Image (tube, helix red, strand yellow):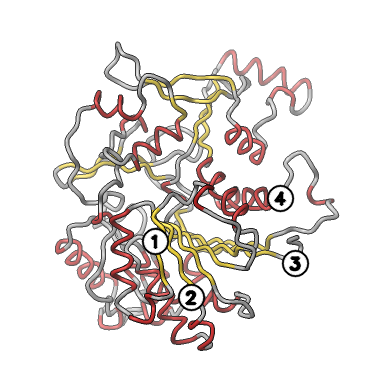
């Protein structure tokens, strides 16, 4: 059971076990792309979330739920843990469990402690969770606050789950409803969190939780035919004379793409950088040994952060996701894994266009870029200015920790340790991190 990402997950880690309604390539491609080309982010959004054909649509079994918590202190060590985990997977219809599920309630308790330790308790505590899965995180956080927060904090708190899946929204209410006192403080809003029309303006401090959300947000793709040519937007088109989808390259013009490139400092033409001699050398090299460039941009994340900062200017953010993914076959910087499952076997694809509703499209999170986008959306970071000399202070205090460091600081790691000292919550998930971002007094 050699794991590709963390030893707590089987090789089919990315594949959500659910039956997929059969449909042909041409039918799906036409439904998603249609007669007019679409940006790559729109193709990915449709491939994952299209109501009829999207990978996550109508799948209540997409996230596994454990019947009971794992008793780690009763397991001898890693071998016993993996054997126990294998038995759980064989008994379940789902192909993977989130960390908050595997380590319940302790994983969520760590998040609850991080919130309790840094929240402004002089105002009623309000928590938003985006993409709350089965509701395990919500219940765990509320359990922890009920037991550890001052009574008035729990009594006056509000927990709002923003969930795009109606089936998961129903499951969340069932999970949280296991504790009667939680229900009157909890509600689910079934909508897309990246749609600004779903939000009002919240002027009070609040928290936003996003666990394994960033990895499935739509990305855009830019392309350059060699080392010195200008970047081009990539669009996806469905030509009538072809059975396969193909790429179309257009000059830069999309606002989200150009904003993301500014944050990354990719907007400048490489030929304008450096000395004249260096520019000449790069041009010669590009002619002799042309090397196409492809770069994936987290425009879905940028859009979501723009919406959140606009609607919740005093929010504190806690996000967890994968910082890198091994064995990626798709080309380009920050490229995704595209994985499908058939007859119990997983398959990694070489091309994101192979995703036809039966494949997950899964991106790594660049946490340094996430921090820059967070500052950009807060209004502090200006790509064309020297921010180090700015008289205005940062509007956010940020911290990135690997999962083990986060749980050692805020969690109860003794609760997930086996008899011989092996601790899957700390020893596994080496490619996952937590990002915390809180407002400073420079918020106006």
Residues at badges 3 and 1 in contact (C-beta under 8 Å)?
no
Q: Establish if 321 lies above or below 150.
A: above
Mark 1, residues whose alpha carbon is within 10 Å: few (<14), some, or many (≥20)?
Answer: many
Q: Of callouts 1 and 2, which one flags the residue occurring earlier in the amino acid sequence?
A: 2
Q: Residue at x 84, y 51 (%)?
A: 389
Residue 135 point in image, percent of width and height:
35, 66
Q: Whole-Å distance between the Cαs marked 3 and 1?
A: 30 Å
- Secondary structure, mark 4, is loop
Query: Relative to the observer, which residue lies in front, 202 or 418?
Result: 202
Residues at badges 4 and 3 in contact (C-beta under 8 Å)?
no
Judging by the rendered image, the residue that carries numbered circle 2 is: 112
Judging by the rendered image, the residue that carries numbered circle 4 is: 379
Q: Of callouts 4 and 3, which one flags the residue occurring earlier in the amino acid sequence?
A: 4
Judging by the rendered image, the residue that carries numbered circle 3 is: 441
On the picture, is 359 further left or further right than 264?
left
Q: Residue at x 30, y 83 (%)?
A: 73
Indicate which disc residue 210 carries: none
Indicate which disc residue 132 carries: 1
Judge depth for marks 1 and 2 and give the one in front.
1
Q: Whole-Å distance between the Cαs marked 4 and 3?
A: 14 Å
Q: Of callouts 3 and 1, which one flags the residue occurring earlier in the amino acid sequence?
A: 1
């Amino acid at each position: 059971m050699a794991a590709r990402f963390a030893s707590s997950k089987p090789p089919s880690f990315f594949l959500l076990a659910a039956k997929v309604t059969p449909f042909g390539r041409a039918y799906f491609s036409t439904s998603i792309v249609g007669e007019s080309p679409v940006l790559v982010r729109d193709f990915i959004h449709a491939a994952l979330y299209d109501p009829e054909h999207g990978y996550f649509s109508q799948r209540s079994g997409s996230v596994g739920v454990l019947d009971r918590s794992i008793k780690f202190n009763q397991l001898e060590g890693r071998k016993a843990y993996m054997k126990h985990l294998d038995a759980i997977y064989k008994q379940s219809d789902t192909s993977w469990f989130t960390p908050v599920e595997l380590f319940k309630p302790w994983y969520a308790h760590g998040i609850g402690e991080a919130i309790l330790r840094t929240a402004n308790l002089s105002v009623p505590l309000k928590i938003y969770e985006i993409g709350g899965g089965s509701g395990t995180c919500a219940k765990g956080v509320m359990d922890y606050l009920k037991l550890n927060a001052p009574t008035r904090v729990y009594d006056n708190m509000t927990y709002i789950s923003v969930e795009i899946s109606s089936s998961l929204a129903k499951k969340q209410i069932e999970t949280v409803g296991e504790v009667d006192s939680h229900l009157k403080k909890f509600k689910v809003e079934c909508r897309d969190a990246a749609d600004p029309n779903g939000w009002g303006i919240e002027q009070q401090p609040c928290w936003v939780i996003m666990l394994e959300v960033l990895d499935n947000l739509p990305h855009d793709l830019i392309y350059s035919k060699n080392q010195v040519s200008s970047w081009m937007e990539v669009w996806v088109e469905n030509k009538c004379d072809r059975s396969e989808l193909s790429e179309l390259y257009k000059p830069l013009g999309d606002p989200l793409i150009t904003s993301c490139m500014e944050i990354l400092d990719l907007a400048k033409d490489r030929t304008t950088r450096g000395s004249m001699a260096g520019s000449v050398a790069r041009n010669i090299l590009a002619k002799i040994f042309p090397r196409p460039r492809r770069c994936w941009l987290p425009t879905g994340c940028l859009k979501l952060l723009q919406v959140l900062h606009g609607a919740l200017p005093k929010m504190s953010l806690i996000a967890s996701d994968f910082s890198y993914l091994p064995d990626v076959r798709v080309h380009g910087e920050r490229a995704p894994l595209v994985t499908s499952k058939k007859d119990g076997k997983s398959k990694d694809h070489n091309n994101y266009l192979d995703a036809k509703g039966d494949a997950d499209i899964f991106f790594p999170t660049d946490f340094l870029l996430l921090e820059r986008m967070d500052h950009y959306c807060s209004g502090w970071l200006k790509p064309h200015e020297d921010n180090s000399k700015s008289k205005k202070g940062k509007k956010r205090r940020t911290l990135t920790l690997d999962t083990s460091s986060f749980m050692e600081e805020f969690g109860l790691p003794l609760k997930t340790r086996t008899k011989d000292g092996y601790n899957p919550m700390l020893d596994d998930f080496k490619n996952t991190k937590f990002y915390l971002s809180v407002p400073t007094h420079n918020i106006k």
